[in-house]
Amino acid sequence: MQTYRTTLTKKTVFPHDVDLFHFSLNSPETIIFTPGQYIILKVPAEKGFVNRLYSIASASTQADSFELLIKRVPGGLASNYINTFVVGQKVEFCGPAGQFSLKNTPLTKVFLTTGTGIAPIRSFILSNKDPAQSYHLFWGMSFAADLYLLDELKEFAKNAPHFKFTVCLSKEPSLEKIDEADRVFFSLGHVNEAALGLINSLPQNSLEFYICGRREVVESLREYLYTHGIDRSLVYFERY
């Protein structure tokens, strides 16, 4: 597996303890990966190192750098380590690795995810070169205050007519905290509830599902799709 020596060139702090890290490559100077793959960070521990896997969140065409979307977990070993990173710091990674990738089919790709599970989905979206390929993202958040990347998603939807997205707010009683012009991109409730409308409106064999998130979320969404008659061969997933 390749070792990449990088420099942290930018760090963007988002709400809800989420950071977007931009690493520029020093050696080798380029990275080739399939959207959906992850990179491995070796985190110092009491008895050596432990590996932490992070999905690449940037476009595969961005060969001289990559981005990681990471949630800070209070007291977490990796979180404490990564939280010390400052712009200009040298960091080593290994990879890329992983089998989570888009299938080369004409089917509409439906993405179901929550929180930072958006990372590989963002890579899918940013890497898409086929203007005719239909994507629909359902992204779950608890509250409106947790939101990030909205402007990026809106801009992408504006320039890619076959891309649509819905942010699902599971704990908001209403959309009054959302700008009125943006409410078309939101729904109240959970990801599965919002996706059901699409599932019921199109032939099931025209949709392909990609799920990413915490293990319990992925398992719940998979079972939901299966109980609604979705063929298991059309459901792909990545869990952490």
Image (cartoon, rainbow, N blue to C red):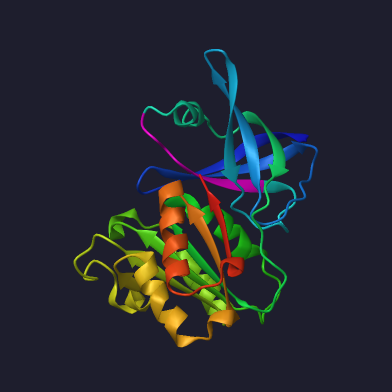
x then y, percent, for residue 185: 39, 74
Q: Residue at x 69, y 47 (%)?
A: 65
Magenta stretch: dominant secondary structure = strand
* Part of the protein shown in magenta: 66-74
- The image shows residue 24, relative to residue 209, as above or below, that is above
x then y, percent, for residue 182: 35, 74
x then y, percent, for residue 67: 60, 47
Which is nearer the eye, 141 or 97? 97
Residue 181 on the magenta segment: no
Task: Decide if residue 154 is on the left or right side of residue 232.
Answer: left
- The image shows residue 210, relative to residue 53, as above or below, that is below
Which is nearer the eye, 155 or 174? 174
Farthest residue toward the left?
173
Q: Quadrant of the N terminus?
A: top right
Is residue 152 shown to the viewer in this render?
no
- The image shows residue 111, relative to residue 163, as above or below, that is above
Residue 70 on the magenta segment: yes
Is residue 86 shown to the viewer in this render?
yes
Which is nearer the eye, 204 or 172? 204
x then y, percent, for residue 85: 53, 30
Query: Residue 100's image quarter?
Result: bottom right
Q: Residue at x 53, y 81 (%)?
A: 204
Q: Residue at x 56, y 13 (%)?
A: 47
- The image shows residue 51, relative to residue 193, as above or below, that is above
